[in-house]
Amino acid sequence: MEYIKVWLVDLNKSLELKNGLKAFQINQIAFAITDKYRSLNLAELNLIFKSAKYGEYGDIMRISIPTVEILAKLTHLFLLY
């Protein structure tokens, strides 16, 4: 779960959002990813976060409810694997 938190913090800093993810949101998202997508290995999760960082999933900056929408994007990606 710590790797996921680091990737979320990195993504949050990279996007330079006005109202970025708060620490409790990062914890919630990391826990939810660990719980819901436990079948994904670290390499797959790393690829997902790198792809998000490079804009391959569209405009993340428009996300209004980060926890819900980030998990929705991961669910979509999970179904593609």
Image: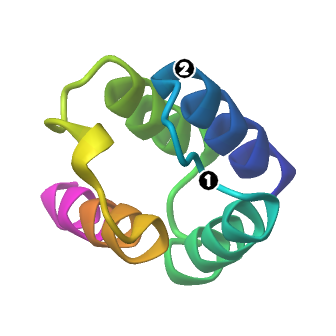
Residue 7 located left or right of residue 58:
right
Nearer to the camera, 14 or 39:
14
What's under tag 1, amino acid-wise? Leu
Q: Position of residue 9 (x, y in %)?
A: 71, 38
Was residue 79 drawn as part of the magenta stretch in this picture?
yes
In the rendered image, the vertical position of residue 30 relative to residue 52, given as above or below:
below
What's under tag 2, amino acid-wise? Ser
- Tell me the residue at 18%/38% (across/down): 57
Between the C-alphas of marks 2 and 1, the distance is: 12 Å
Q: How many C-alpha atoms fall within 10 Å of the one at disc 2: few (<14), some, or many (≥20)?
A: few
Residue under pointer 1 = 21
Helix, strand or loop for the magenta stretch, by majority:
helix
Residue under pointer 2 = 14
Q: Position of residue 44 (x, y in %)?
A: 47, 41
| The residue stretch that appears in magenta | 75-81
Q: Residue furthest front?
A: 18
Q: How many C-alpha atoms fall within 10 Å of the one at disc 1: few (<14), some, or many (≥20)?
A: some
Was residue 66 drawn as part of the magenta stretch in this picture?
no
Q: Secondary structure at mark 1?
A: loop
- Tell me the residue at 77%/38% (across/down): 6
